[in-house]
Every structure is written in C-alpha cells, then in structure tokens.
Amino acid sequence: MERTVVRCAEGHVFRTTRFPMQQADRLGPARLIRCPRCARLRHAVPVPVPVPAPVPGPVEPAPR
C-alpha cells in the first residue's frame, strides 16, 4: 500500500496509508482523517514530496 504524506489543519505533517478517494477530484484535496499528533479528526491535505535529484555517477574520461 502506498503511503501518502499529509498535513492536518493544525500543521502537523505525517504519513498515512489511508487517504480515501484520492482520485475523486470533485471532492477537493482535503479529507477528514485522524491526526496522530493531535489525536483528533482533522482536515488533511496531501503534501507535495520533492523528488530527490539524481546522484551523479562516476565521470568517464574523454576519448582520445
């Protein structure tokens, strides 16, 4: 199962495996889920996770 990084209405950022109806665009991005930090049901929105930059490989010498 894919883990989604979300931010609750209080600003807490956490990962969850349960983020219902992610494909339902007409409902908007926010969902009501339980925040583990506040221990309450809060509106949560997905947080864009930056894609790590590729690690440069070894430099090959130029052909002679």
Image: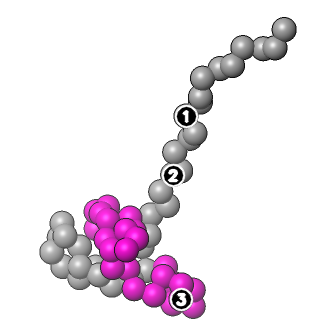
Does 31 sit above or below residue 5? below
User: Residue extending furthest top?
Assistant: 64
Q: Amino acid at mark 2?
A: Pro
Query: Does the magenta portion include 10?
Result: yes
Circle 2 packing at 10 Å, graded few (<14), some (14-19), many (20+), is few
The quadrant of the picture occupied by the C terminus is top right
Q: Amino acid at mark 1?
A: Val
Task: Look at the image and tell me whether residue 7 can be seen.
Answer: no
**Nearest the camera: 64 or 9?**
64
Mark closer to the chain start, 3 or 1? 3
| Residue at screen point 52% across, 45% down | 52
In the rendered structure, which segment of residues is drawn in magenta?
Answer: 1-29
Q: Pinpoint residue 55: horizontal percent, then vertical percent.
A: 55, 34
| Residue at screen point 57% across, 91% down | 26
Q: In the picture provided, is 52 more to the left or to the right than 64? A: left
**Residues at marks 3 and 1, CA–CA distance in whole angstroms:** 35 Å
**Nearest the camera: 57 or 24?**
57
| Residue at screen point 33% across, 79% down | 18
Q: Which residue is mark 1?
A: 55
Q: Nearer the viewer, mark 2 or mark 1?
A: 1
Query: Does the magenta portion include 28?
Result: yes
Q: In the picture provided, is 15 more to the left or to the right than 37? A: right
Q: Nearer the viewer, mark 3 or mark 1?
A: 1
Q: Which residue is mark 2?
A: 50
Q: SS of the residue at dot 1?
A: loop
The quadrant of the picture occupied by the N terminus is bottom left
Q: Which residue is mark 3?
A: 24
**Nearest the camera: 58 or 11?**
58
